[in-house]
Image: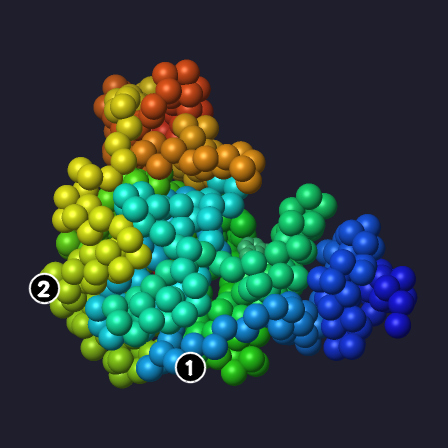
Amino acid sequence: MRMYDIIMKKRNGGELSREEIRFFIERYTLGEIPEYQASALMMAVYFQKMTQRETFELTMAMAESGDMLDLSGIAGVKVDKHSTGGVGDKTSLALAPLVAACGIPVAKMSGRGLGHTGGTIDKLESFPGFTTSLTTKQFIENVNRVGIAIMGQTADLAPADKKLYALRDVTATVDNLSLIASSIMSKKLAAGADAIVLDVKTGSGAFMKSEEDAFALAREMVRIGRSAGRNTIAVVSDMNQPLGRTVGNALEVREAVETLRGEGPEDFQELVLTLGVQMLLAGGIAKEEKEARDNLEKAIADGAALRKMAEFIEAQGGDPGAVYDTEKLPAAKLVRPIPAPRSGYVKQIACDEVGICSMMLGGGRETKEDEIDLSVGFELRKKVGDRVEKGEPLAILHANDQAKAEEAEKRFVRAYLIGEEEPEPPILIKGVI
Ligand code: URA
């Protein structure tokens, strides 16, 4: 078999066989296929697309390119959750302890921020002392003892995807449905859970800008998961504006804590409950939606979810006191309102722009080596549909550097579109597949 023939077959619109896909993935992971041939194949896939069978074979080949985590040492149905990435998306921070408090064993591998979207691992590091560098043995022990553990993705998890994703990122071949679906699902399958609940984001802050594309991606990932024998469910949710009211690592942790106290913003709480219901159903903890929702609401009301979060933070070296007193989380020096430039209704918020503004303050990485400033970000006081008067705060800015604050504030104001007419309220949950 020759890589040249595989590239030409795809370039001419042919369907690659299992053997051809495996040949490419295995040799590319070993460094035997050069980057320029892999780039050519990715571009051919981008234009000619992949069939469902090819997409499945690519996913399995990438999943099996490294370690497949064995979670059989943990009793119960392990349910994983994954978001395709968004702005202000702190869902896992609240959802993981919440479902763990309801009896779902949570063994989760998470990533760091990517581009303008944040990552769970970075956010969790807002808890002083917290670490996600666990060995697989510690990870499994923690889940058995505490009911929940979150660790960073190991280098041996789907290494083919790691290499290919970095290549796609610099060759304009990220936004292809088959390539995104196989990239995400290869990592989820290798991470070993029995069931997977996906939160597929759509809108200006998401990879999938249109609802149609988001639904197609959701359907493709559900198909892959089920073909691989894992119960897979996808929720398609809105990312046309930041989720909840905070953007920035420690600010988002604070909001997740408030949500577990029952004091979170309505949209964020609704998404957490919607995903939580699917996780409890998939894990066999509840038989129907109402029962699942009641369980989740009870765990919030009686403090079990908050206690579980404190236990989890402590088990991974963090200060559990910060769960009960969020003043202990990193705080910025400059905290000031961003006034609205005019009166009217908030019609749109360019969500990706808000993510970029947070990065400009130091809340995200421009390069892989950058250190993150955990304390910076925004508290949104106005969201889509809200009435605002000129001079009223659109948001509260948290920064540590005057020059960066000024630059980010200017860009933040431009992300808001304020008009005369009251817009239709946005729909948060677009559908469940
Ligand atoms: N997230 C991933 O892990 N892979 C993609 O291709 C896109 C988003």
Tag 1's secondary structure?
Answer: loop
Q: Give percent across and percent down for residue 315.
A: 27, 60
Q: Which residue is drawn at 28% across and 28% down?
A: 332
Q: Give percent across and percent down for residue 139.
A: 38, 66
| Nearer to me, 377 or 294 | 377
Q: Give percent across and percent down for residue 82.
A: 44, 62
| Nearer to me, 284 or 340 | 284
Category of crowding for the residue at label 2, using alpha-carbon neighbours closer than 10 angstroms: few (below 14), some (14–19), many (at least 20): few
From the viewer's perspective, is the residue at label 2 or at label 1 nearer? 1
Count the marks. 2
Is there a contact, CB below 8 Å, between mark 2 and mark 1? no
**Looking at the image, is 252 positioned above or below residue 156?**
above
Figure quadrant of residue 227: bottom right
**Looking at the image, is 299 positioned above or below residue 289?**
above
Category of crowding for the residue at label 1, using alpha-carbon neighbours closer than 10 angstroms: few (below 14), some (14–19), many (at least 20): few
Q: Dot 1 corresponds to which residue?
A: 72
Image-quarter location of ligand 1: bottom right
Viewport quadrant of the N terminus: bottom right
Query: If you read the primary sequence from the N terminus, does the residue marked by circle 2 or circle 1 appear first?
Result: 1
Q: Which residue is drawn at 28% across and 22% down?
A: 334
Viewport quadrant of the C terminus: bottom left
Q: Which residue is drawn at 17% across and 58% down?
A: 306
For the residue marked with disc 1, what is the amino acid? Ser
Q: CB of residue at label 1: within 8 Å of ligand 1?
A: no
- The label number, if any, that marks residue 101 in the structure image: none
| Nearer to me, 392 or 385 | 392
Q: Dot 2 corresponds to which residue?
A: 302
Tag 2's secondary structure?
Answer: loop
**Looking at the image, is 29 positioned above or below residue 355?**
below
